[in-house]
Amino acid sequence: MVAYTKLPPNHEHSSLTQKPIITDGLDPLAPIALRSRKRARRPESVLSGPLEKVYLIWIVGGSCDGCTVAVSGATHPRVEDLLRGNIPGLPRIDIIHTVLSVESGPEWVANLRMAANGELDAPYIVAWEGSVMDERQSGEYGYWMGLGEDEDGRPITSLEWLDRLAPGAAAIIAVGTCATWGGIPAAKGNPTNSMGVMDHLGKDYRSALGLPVINVPGCAPVGDNIIETAAAALMFLAGLAPLPEFDELGRPAWLFTETVHRHCPRAGYYEEGVFAHEYGDKECLVELGCWGPVVQCNIAERGGVDGHGGCMNMGGICIGCTMPGFPDKFSPIYERAPGALLSTNTNRVVGGFIRRMRQLSQRDKMRSKRWEGSEELPSGWGRYKTQPVGAERGIHRVYSWRQHAKEGR
Amino acid sequence: MCFKNLPVEFDASGKARLREGVSSPYALTGAGQKSFVRGAKSVGSAVAPPKLREWNIDPVTRVAGALAVHTVLDLQSRTAVEAHSMAMLFRGYEIILQGRDPRDAIDISSRACGVCGGVHSTVSSLAIEMAFGITPPPLGVLVRNLGEVAEMFYDHPLHLGLLAGPDYSTAIVSVTNPELVERAARTPAPHSDVHGFKTVKDIMDGFNPLEGSIYLEALEHTRVARVMCALMYGKFPHPSTLVPGGVSTTVSTSTFNEYYGHLGRMFDYAKKLAGIWDDICDFFLEANPAYAQVGARQSNLIQTGIWDNPAVYDATYKNMDVWGDARYSSPGVIVDGKLVTTKLTQVNMGVEEFIEHSFYDDWTKSAPPRFTTDMLGNPLSPYHAWNKVTIPRAEGRSFKEKYSWDTAPRWDRLSMETGVYGRMWTTALAKTLPSNPYLEATGSGLRITMPRNELPEMELHWETPAILNAFERNRARAYGVAFTAAIGMICLDQAFQYWRKGETAVSTPYTVPRDERVSVGMWEAGRGFLTHHLHMDKGKLINYQINTPSTWNASPRDPFGTPGPYEEAIIGTPILESLPDEEIKGIDVLRAIRSFDPCMPCTTHMDTGHGIITREVNSCSCTLE
């Protein structure tokens, strides 16, 4: 049971008149829950399903805002397209978010209060960013994370909002490794007893639509992973698509089933037993501390931003940031994993042999038929004689004979 | 003599020492520094009795992270008369860093802030290489520089377009000041040939949230910037290629070529932003000169410098003043508009952090300071980061006592702000830039040459403002994009040179030292000042302290009663809305706050300590049960 913040006994009730809250829905600084009602429906939205709009309440606990930053950089789809209702068939998202909302302070908090009281005119999804910090540990009157206050001036913790909003939410999406598994604020030595959203809400939690918590891990997640999951959930809500597939930890199964190593552009070096020794080398990073072979993530094929970059793609080791064991089970971060000793050395032997065989074959394939028998390459760039001699020549002949045997030539 | 309040003097050779005959040099005595007094109206002197409205802006939106501001508006004098800035979040990162391999700090401290995606990992690498005694190769330094250039291209447009911009939009101004929108429609935009908006109202339309072209273009340009970051850092936010002694980025021929292609797109955008913000700021200030008082405070600025010169940087504390001065953006301290030092050691030794109004206990009472001097013998305060042991104590909020998770950093016991404008300001005054085709410091401003793209080559001039207010902060941030692009070109030119010469190494081998080491990383985030102070022994961290720009800007009052920069900027801000008293929106207060580009995530957990902390906090909850 969570203890909510109380007003301290010595709290001096302010004798000052409070600045009145804006309730005119035509005022751009009024709560979006009021403004949204005044907004005209789009007459041209033929494809729209039963749902014209959905509220997205994005609240943070022990967060660095990195997931917000990640999602705002996403391109499939772009966040502004969802917020503007530009995607046919998908409901428009009216967002309640501290970084993006137009309204501030009491007007902003009014949105949350209306949602908790069931007064919104459309369903709401809760996106939670950051760890759930245990507010039982912050004392009777204090808070680890305060987010708005009640009419009497009592600070409300963001965790209290989660508890108030969870039962009525159409879905809860835990965004990022802090929200999913606890992340760095939950690492060894932490004073806030941090945890993930599921740890807090429990195994039996179901949203108003009957869904357990949806988890999109990563520190920060690839922006497209967040927004694609949200879009998939919206398509389901709009009656367009089936419920997307989630794995046993509530992750979007199509994004997090494979290990990142399987799609790593350097995995070929691993296979051939060639490893980077210094930072900046182009080969496989496992001996520099990369955990890619055991980490479920898709950044290697999806890229970091709009298809560009990616950790190992650019030379960064995988530190396991999508995994429930992050960070403590991946530290010390810059040391090679003990298991890599066996796997890399095995591959040095086996992969090293295969690599040499491939190089042999490669030397043959890099000469056109026309060049056969000539001492030199016809290229002005060529500096070396490339005609195979001796045993290698024999091997190529045998290989070629075997390769073309079934073609009857 | 840069110190006026701390009893620190310098001998003939420039070495610092404590003034003789001062019995307790760092005692918390003395009155508060005199607050900035505005020209237009003096606070509390209204003839009629005040008509006060309390307004607790919790949360302040369109800032990064958890910020709340308590303010009192006097509707009689139409001024904000009181302000308390509250950081609302505590996570305890430095407690988590205790006892870890120092290298882990690169990736763990990075997660302190996802808004300034790579600055924490970078400054952490700097601290670690100083501790390990290694110097990164030139190309490693340049890749770091270019990554940070890209990060600013994400940071400044995001703030200008999405966070601050809407406060100047038609949607909002037509409610708060309809007469200004009418006037804007009649006012041709002076820089329309650059940005294409015919009237000032067209610019204000562009700022409309989610609809306006400036808003949407900003978001799209942050994506270009993030791609540039990803080229250097792999990932954004939280880069994956920063390592002790350089970077692990696999630099290929395409790396710089692709980067150059994207950088070219920023030249025109920089020109447009400067024109847009010149036009909007001048319009407001001409329409009503009282706007100059919105968010105004004394020009006290502190900067740590950023973008190292690879030929000079050697990562040693001994030469810190030399390589600090060689940075393309100069470190330094400005007091009341005058540059008092550019030396990083002096910036470092003058910093103290106070917790009188923060949810922590005073560490100086439990044990003597670990360090009375730095490695060169310069005196250090018990409140200095290397001595700091923070003991968090969550408790009820009281404006007379404790009200923020943020501490109160002070330099020479002065309340300092920091930001992109500060870094342009110190660079302009310090005049230490090497000769180059893109950027020149004139002593009173900057001359920035933006190469041609679609628009022709242009020379932009930024002058240090006479009064630092909300408009000048935003204007400078807009010019900051060009400033950054110029430095991007300088660094890219150099990167190509080293690449041509075949000096392609990006990192230096190292071993983790087992003996005791003390070091500091000094660098800048988008918003300015950033330090990581490191203390390690036997290959493990003993203490790790983070001080961020918004720690300064968002700070609560200090033991001497001086408000922090947000607070100073709000107190005395006029309410210039043309609305009846009961309908006041408070937009000018919000403009004042947002002009700092607040970023709270990493402001609020620079807290360290030993096992004690957890027990103390537990005892709180025991009382509860």
Image (cartoon, helix red, strand yellow):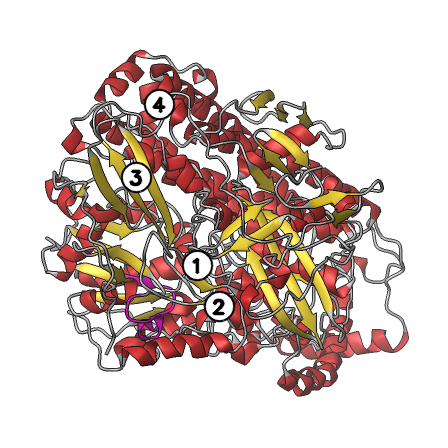
Tag 3 residue: B210
Q: What's the chain of the residue with tag 1?
A: A
Disc number lying in front (1 or 2): 2
Marks 4 and 3 belong to one chain: yes
Q: What's the chain of the residue with tag 2?
A: B
Disc number lying in front (4 or 3): 4
Where residue B146 sits, quadrant-wise, is top right
- x and y percent of residue B445 in the render? 61, 24
- x and y percent of residue B399 in the render? 33, 52
Marks 2 and 4 belong to one chain: yes
- x and y percent of residue B61 in the render? 32, 46
Tag 1 residue: A64
Tag 2 residue: B391
Tag 4 residue: B41
Question: Residue at image x 65%, y 43%?
Answer: B305
Q: What type is the residue that disc 4 sits on? A: Lys
Check the picture and name the quadrant holding the C terminus of chain B. bottom left
**Judging from the image, what secondary structure is the residue with disc 4 in?**
loop
Task: Look at the numbered discs 1 and 2 and tell me whether their residues touch, using CB distance below 8 Å.
Answer: no
